[in-house]
């Protein structure tokens, strides 16, 4: 939801033009159809303009603030809807947001969340539309790491922050009791950080969940092109490409710590659930990641949703979101050995 939220706002503003209407499949729920019924390609494109990666940092800071303010309007709503308890904490010198569901019962199990936002947007505070519903479904505490955003930090510093926080958390929770999940760019950061942990000899989390993950930051993969004119949220040229450049120089784009789809999965890697929507240009990313894990005999599930857009799980009132969250819960319970 986060990566496209400002683009969606532009869609709503421009909907009356009814140009370049997004295809509305009859195979998705009525609630999902209602969400995207007014979205247009022109509206999407109208919001898809960013400064180049080498623009002055204050230019990026200004637009990051604007995006955060737009996204924050949903935060009080989801917290109230679910009755969650939200607190700030610091571990290893890294800030994070702790989310506990209503009537939380202390547990030795925990979920780490690496939020999305194209590597460049949103503090963890404004990503609660993802973490609060999942915390409610699982009954588990979710800790969202508030990593430094690009271009203020590059990929190597950001993944180091994730690992530093994770190692500090290991003083409180055992690795076998920690699941990690990430959406969009957060999925890339999560998977890359786990590859980096493994390569550094650090015990990895128990399991990994990827929602609409941006697993190859280059415009490579069939659906970057076949779905280019039907993805209601994502625009590569002039938007995603600048975010990718802000995160890592082009010479590093095939580095597994940037684009984890290029990782060596012949070595250890935790059981992984990959969820992706049928409308996303990132669909190929998920398919490629699944095949790489599957062909290396890793435990992996590919969970594809008909007609869904980027990080639809954040639209927590639609049936497809509830289904995805339920399947995520079941996966987490399976590997964390929690009775349903």
Image (cartoon, helix red, strand yellow):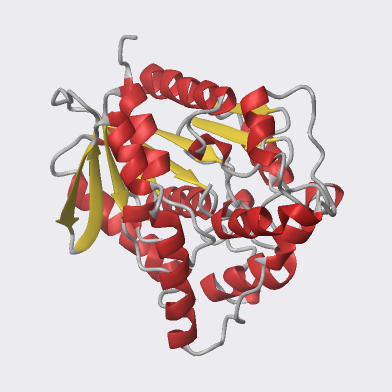
Residue farthest along the top direction in this orientation: 340
| Residue positioned 56% across, 22% down in the render | 319
| Residue positioned 64% across, 30% down in the render | 32
The tally of labels here is 0
Please give left or right for residue 306 compared with residue 229 in the image.
left
Please give left or right for residue 35 compared with residue 59 in the image.
right
Does 302 sit above or below residue 247? above
**Residue 134 placement (x, y as % from top left):** 38, 31
Q: Nearer the viewer, residue 338 or 89?
A: 89
Does 210 sit above or below residue 339? below
**Residue 175 placement (x, y as % from top left):** 27, 36
Q: Nearer the viewer, residue 267 or 247?
A: 247
Figure quadrant of residue 300 = top right
Residue 204 visible in the current orientation: no
Query: In the rendered image, which quarter contains the C terminus?
Result: top left
Residue farthest along the front direction in this orientation: 16
Figure quadrant of residue 46 = bottom right
Does 169 sit above or below residue 217? above
**Residue 311 placement (x, y as % from top left):** 56, 42
Does 275 sit above or below residue 337? below
| Residue positioned 25% across, 50% down in the render | 97
Residue 307 visible in the current orientation: yes
**Residue 162 placement (x, y as % from top left):** 34, 56
Q: Nearer the viewer, residue 44 or 34?
A: 34
């Amino acid at each position: 939801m986060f990566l496209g939220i400002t683009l969606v706002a532009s869609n709503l503003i421009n909907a009356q033009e009814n140009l370049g209407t997004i295809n509305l499949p009859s195979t998705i729920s009525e609630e999902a159809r209602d969400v995207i019924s007014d979205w247009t390609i022109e509206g999407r494109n109208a919001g898809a303009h960013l400064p180049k990666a080498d623009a002055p940092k204050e230019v990026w800071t200004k637009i990051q603030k604007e995006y955060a303010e737009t996204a924050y309007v949903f935060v009080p709503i989801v917290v109230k809807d679910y009755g969650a308890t939200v607190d700030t904490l610091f571990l290893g010198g890294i800030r994070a947001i702790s989310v506990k569901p209503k009537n939380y019962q202390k547990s030795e199990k925990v979920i780490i969340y690496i939020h999305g936002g194209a590597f460049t947007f949103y503090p963890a505070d404004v990503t609660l539309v993802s973490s609060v519903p999942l915390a409610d479904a699982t009954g588990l505490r979710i800790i969202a790491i508030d990593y430094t955003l690009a271009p203020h930090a590059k990929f190597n510093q950001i993944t180091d922050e994730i690992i530093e926080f994770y190692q500090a958390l290991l003083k409180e929770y055992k690795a076998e009791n920690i699941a990690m999940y990430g959406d969009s760019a957060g999925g890339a950061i999560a998977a890359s950080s786990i590859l980096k942990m493994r390569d550094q000899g650090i015990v990895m989390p128990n399991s990994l969940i990827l929602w609409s993950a941006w697993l190859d930051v280059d415009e490579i993969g069939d659906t970057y092109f076949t779905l280019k004119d039907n993805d209601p949220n994502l625009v590569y040229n002039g938007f995603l490409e600048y975010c990718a450049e802000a995160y890592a120089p082009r010479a590093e784009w095939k580095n597994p710590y940037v684009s984890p789809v290029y990782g060596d999965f012949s070595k250890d890697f935790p059981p992984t659930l990959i969820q992706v929507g049928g409308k996303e240009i990132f669909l190929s990313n998920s398919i490629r990641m699944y095949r790489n894990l599957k062909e290396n005999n890793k435990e992996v599930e590919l969970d594809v949703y008909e007609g869904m857009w980027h990080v639809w799980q954040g639209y927590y009132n639609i049936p497809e979101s509830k289904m995805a969250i339920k399947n995520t819960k079941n996966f987490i319970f399976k590997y964390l050995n929690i009775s349903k």
